[in-house]
Image (cartoon, helix red, strand yellow):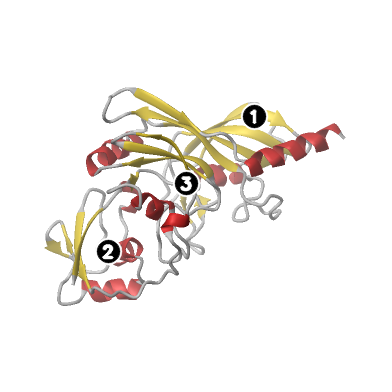
Amino acid sequence: MKRKILKVNPFDSSQRLDKFLATKLDISRSAAKKFIAGNFPAKVDGRIRSAHYCVESGATVEVFFPDKVKRKNVEVAASQVRYETIYRDSEIAVINKPPGLVVHPAPSVRQATLLAALETEYDTPRLVHRLDKDTSGVIVAALNDTVAAALQKQFKDRNVSKIYNAVAEGSIREDYGEISVPVKRAARDRTKMKVGWVRARKSVTRFKVIERFESAVFVEAYPLTGRTHQIRVHLAYYGHPILGDSKYASSGTSAPRQLLHARSIAFTHPGTKEKVQFSAPLPDDFTYMLKNLRIAKKK
């Protein structure tokens, strides 16, 4: 039997124990339930818990499972994952994530992830925030649990500043604006988020129009909160979904992927206590689309 100790981060808070283990161990949910109900039951902070128990941020989960476990995913060598390291020291690594790369493992993910790739290079990397698969740009990894906890607290306290670039459909009238509507998970499709007011979480996104085209706008977005799919949901609710967003754009895809890029992030370095900022340039597919939009505008 193998013994695994897992720390619950803020992004996994309030998940059922069986779902949490399925995601972290890359196994099916039914297999996770068997482990929990087996001869070596799972423990949360030292206490035996059932499958439906909801784990909370900061908790420690201990689980035993067989040496040979049937994985749900089809593994791809993590060493094949390509990414750019913007900055690294003994405590953090800042990555420029390419579009199409999944960040965290999950039962439904059938490809190598950024986290798996980082684990081949660092001993205990911890990704302290998330980017969607088709969103490119800056993402930060802590290289030990102490630094991870310090960075996650900055995110929780909203002391992290992020700037995104996006190309949105249509013509936004205002040069500046703020979208402040709550966001929650959609009931019929759990992979989607939606605007809602019952059991929804406060969500605020500010934006600035950088450039206008015939049927699209190039914008900067400043998320003041960090909800799942927040910028995508807010712009779609505002009537200007992100170009190429197959999940939230009603007109279908008109770009190879959603044109959303995490351009920069600023926070206090947990080690040096200094304010740091890191940026990533627009990727080629994004600049190519902007070029075509500018050409079409001149015609």
Residue beneath disc 3: 131
Q: Kindly tell me whether residue 240 is visible in this rendering.
A: no
Point out the image quarter for the N terminus: bottom left
188 relative position to 140: left or right: right
Q: Position of residue 194 (x, y in %)?
A: 52, 52
In the rendered structure, which amino acid carries the disc numbered 1?
A: Val
Closer to the chain start, of discs 2 and 3, is 2
- Per the image, label 2 sits on a secondary structure element best described as helix
Give the amino acid at mark 2: Leu
Q: In the image as oriented, which residue stretches furthest toward the left? A: 46
Q: CA distance from mark 2 to mark 3?
A: 24 Å
Q: Which residue is mark 2?
A: 17
Q: Secondary structure at mark 1?
A: strand
- The mark that comes first in sequence, 3 or 1, is 3
- Quick one: 34 or 226, which is closer to the camera? 34
Q: Which mark is residue 209?
A: 1
